Amino acid sequence: MSDAGIYKTILKEGNHEFVINKSRFIGYGCPCSTEEEALGFIHRIQLRHRDATHNCYAYIIGQNSGIMRYSDDGEPGGTAGMPILDVIRKRGIVNCAVVVTRYFGGVLLGAGGLVRAYTQGSKEALDASCVILMTKTDRYLIEVDYSIWQRLSHYLRSAPVFIEKSEFETSVISSLLIRTCDTPAVLDEISRISDGRAEFLYEDSLYYPWPAENEED
C-alpha cells in the first residue's frame, strides 16, 4: 500500500502450524523495517528449525516495496518462495518477512499442492501477526472545563481517535491521537461541542498502527 500517509504492515511476530498430507508446516511472520532485520529474523527461524526439510521465505522492505526477495530453499522452483511473496504483495503488506517451515511427512504434494501449502502458510503467518495500517497521525492535547467534559467524552467514544490518557485536575486534559486525514473534522467537532472553549495544543506527528478493517486477500 502506497497511499500518502498510509502503509500496511504487521504488528508483531506471529506463527501458525498446520498439517497437509502428513507434512507439518509452520508459517512465521515478523515486522521488519530493514533488510538486515528481515535476514536476521529468517536466520533465527532457520536455526530454530535446523532439522526441518525446508525453511522457505520471502520479504518486502520499504513503503514502496523497494526490496523484494524470496527463497524456495530446495523446494522445486516457483513452488514455495514465490507463492509466499505473492500473498504478501497481493495483500499490499510491506516491511515484513515470512518464513514457512516444512517437515516432510513422506507424501509428495506435487507442484500444485506445494503452491497451495506455501500460500496457506504465508496467509496464516500474516493473520497471526496482525495486519495493521501504519497511518500518519497527529497528537493533540485537548483541555476543557469539567462542564464540557461529559459531552466531549461522549463524542470521543465514537470518534476516529485514540485517547492516550486523560488527566483530571483543575480542568480535563486529554492526549488524543487523530489520523491526520481526520484531524480538521475532529477538531472542528470538538470546537462545536465545546462552544469554542476547548483549547488545542499540537504536539507532534507520527505513524501509528490503526486496525486494517475489511481486508481482502
Image: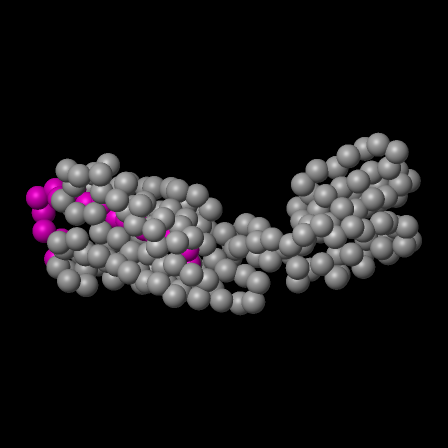
Left or right position of 156 against 101: right
Give the residue at the far top of this rendering: 169
Q: Is residue 102 magenta?
A: yes
The answer to whether 79 appears left or right of 17 in the picture is left
> Residue 8: x, y in percent?
48, 57
Q: Quadrant of residue 18?
A: top left
Q: Is residue 98 magenta?
A: yes
Whether residue 138 appears in this view of the structure is yes
Q: Residue at x 9, y 47 (%)?
A: 107
Q: Residue furthest front?
A: 36
Q: Quadrant of residue 163?
A: top right
Q: Give the image location of residue 161, x and y in percent.
A: 68, 50
Q: Which residues are magenta?
A: 94-110
- Foreground pick, 30 / 16: 30
Residue 127: tell me if it is visible. Answer: no
Front one among 213 and 89:
89
